[in-house]
Amino acid sequence: MKIDLEQLIRALSNTVDLVGVDEIHHGKRVAYMTLGCTGIMGVDQEERNRIFRTGLLHDCGVSSTKVHRHLIDEVDWAEADQHCQIGAERLRRIPGLASMAEPVRYHHTRWQILKELPLPERTKIHANLIYLLDRVDALAALHQAPNRLAAKEDIRRKVLNFRHTYFHPQLVEIFLTASDSEAFWITMEPQHLEEFLKKRQSDSEEIVVEDESLRTVAAIFAEIVDAKSPYTAEHSRGVASLSRYLAERCGVPSPVCEKIEVAGLLHDLGKLQVPDMILEFKGELKEEEQATMRHHSFVTYQILKKIGGLEDIALWAGNHHERLDGSGYPFRRTAAELDQESRIIIVADIFQALAQNRPYRVSQSPETIVNILKKGADHGQLDYGLVSLVESDLSTCYAMATPPS
């Protein structure tokens, strides 16, 4: 199976942007602004593309809505470097994106410090450009103006005041030149930004990644989700592991087992848009909060279906809260609409969630878990054959669902 790397990058960017909850275009705006600046810098197309992708993914070390709020609401803050380190480590593991790791590592380092570090000059320039544009977007979010164009001159003055300290003086001049037009600011409004990026994506050269690279990228997606809260830690990996094991026990062909594992890794992408306080709430959620939670599997499906070649994976992952009797969500699918792969992920998701500590209960024993699954099967919600398979191999299933950190 070959997947377009550009589509994977956009999906990863969409996933990272979900952390902003209501502010979901930060990475896209930073990436868009790099194009205006690099056009003036005179770099070649390959370098422009690399800086653009760095802008899209520069915050891939962020999982928490609390951390994201700092990034948008403050020009500088004490723990900003932590997400830079995490993001760089993740990018180093993705074939084709490793060259972006060092700029991401230093994209919150002030120029007065960065210029003295033993790094290639190009790395310093890329990192500081991302930092400058990242803070431009934060300044716009903080501004009380009705739109970005109205905030233009105030933001440009503040950036000018930060030259030599926060930002390379030449990059400041390049930004001031690029941002002089009204179109620069108006294009960042959501409807215009999406149109601009869609056009740019259609013009991009296709770069493909192979199966093993896809699994690596999927594992990194899962890390981002599972790092969101102590109560989501290791969930995606456990669901993926158990899903693949059950698929193998059912005699599913090996290539499909691999795709089921990837679907398990990716099934909870949409949960990044759920505020931390809801995931970590210790009581019963109110109806409005439950509605927020019920968005996440639909959002997962919407992100994944845009990647050519992952249509099956998108469907299986998006179905993980469906039930055979039509009582699940978000599509209210019934047994006739839920294939074996979806049914496997549904059972694995319930099993793993019950095996984990959650804010409203402690982890359940294997025996309690299988009894809950059997009740679901008796009520027509879960696949009876899969539940019987779990019961017959309970200790191994529990081990698969709770892999060591």
Image (cartoon, rainbow, N blue to C red):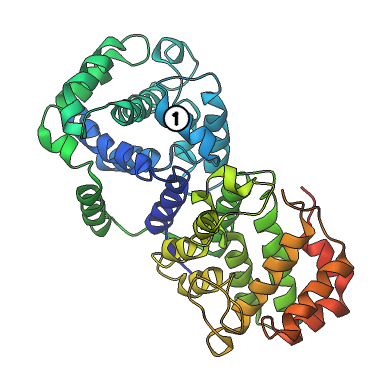
Residue at image point 74% right, 75% down: 246
Report which residue position mark 1 lands on. 71
316 is higher (above) or lower (below) than 187: below
Q: Describe residue 49's horizontal placement relative to residue 182 as left or right.
A: right
Q: Can you tell which quarter of the image residue 369 is in?
A: bottom right
Q: Nearer the viewer, residue 154 or 344?
A: 154
What kind of element bears circle 1? helix
Can see residue 6?
yes
Residue at image point 73% right, 83% down: 377
Report the number of discs: 1
Residue type highlighted by circle 1:
Leu
Residue at image point 79% right, 63% down: 400
Q: Position of residue 79 (x, y in %)?
A: 56, 23
Label 1 crowd (10 A; few <14 / some 14-19 / many >=20): many
327 is higher (above) or lower (below) than 42: below
Q: Describe residue 260's horizontal placement relative to residue 347 as left or right.
A: left
Q: Position of residue 368 (x, y in %)?
A: 86, 68
- Residue farthest bottom in this picture: 336
Q: Nearer the viewer, residue 19 or 103?
A: 19
Q: Position of residue 2 (x, y in %)?
A: 46, 67
Q: Nearer the viewer, residue 401 or 122?
A: 401
Residue at image point 39% right, 53% down: 10
Q: Nearer the viewer, residue 257 or 191?
A: 191
Can see residue 250?
no
237 is higher (above) or lower (below) than 105: below
Q: Describe residue 171's horizontal placement relative to residue 254 as left or right.
A: left
Q: Describe residue 267's horizontal placement relative to residue 30 as left or right.
A: right
